[in-house]
Amino acid sequence: MKMSKINSLFLGLILAGSVSLVNAQTTQPETSAATSQTANPTIESLKKQIEANPKDTESLAKLAAAYQDASDWPNAIDTWKKISVLLPDWAPSYYSQAYAYQSAKDDANAKIAYEKYIATVKPEEVEQNKKNLAYAYFYLAFTEQKTDPNKAKEHIAKSIQYDPTNEDAVKLSKTLNS
């Protein structure tokens, strides 16, 4: 699959707020007919597609987004990790991993994934990734404000450089620089 097709898919998922999916509980193992009846049909369909072609990154991205829509953070994380292995230079997979880790309250891994995202964004991709870069730097600044205030100041300056309208970043900058 071409990277532009993946980037378009990811951008479409982000801009559209992801695909609207049936809300279903997907964190329980499927051990009975009753359980499989309550499973998310979109997730199940995508899992079958991926079973047939484990390197189908487009279906993997759709599956990861479906897991996120269902708030199934462990499966979302695992799926984004699979995409990162298949497409190690595709920055959005690291941003999505970070988002899923953050949603799962795993701040240490969220921080690592945001750092990887920042490092993976190519210079020619910066313009289209400004909002996400701003948030990634904000998150890093927020998590480092007590342990490494100087590093936090660097991160918050970058965050504001990418998105000067982010009120939370501006407030954190004032706090860090006071």
Image (cartoon, grey):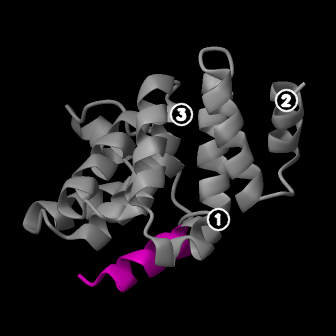
Outermost left residue = 52
Counting residues from the start of the chain, the first of labels 3 and 1 encountered is: 3
Name the foreground residue: 20 vs 114.
114
Name the foreground residue: 74 vs 137.
137
Outermost front residue = 150
Residue stretch in magenta:
1-13
Name the foreground residue: 22 vs 76.
76
Compared with 116, 16 (above or below) is: below
Numbered label attached to residue 177: 2
- Describe residue 59's horizontal placement relative to residue 174 as left or right: left
Numbered label attached to residue 102: 3
The reply to whether dot 1 and dot 2 touch (C-beta < 8 Å) is: no
Quarter containing the N terminus: bottom left
Alpha-carbon span between mark 3 and mark 1:
19 Å
Provide the major secondary structure of the magenta segment. helix
Badge 1 is on which residue? Answer: 130
Is 88 covered by the magenta stretch?
no
Picture coordinates of residue 3 (x, y %)?
32, 80
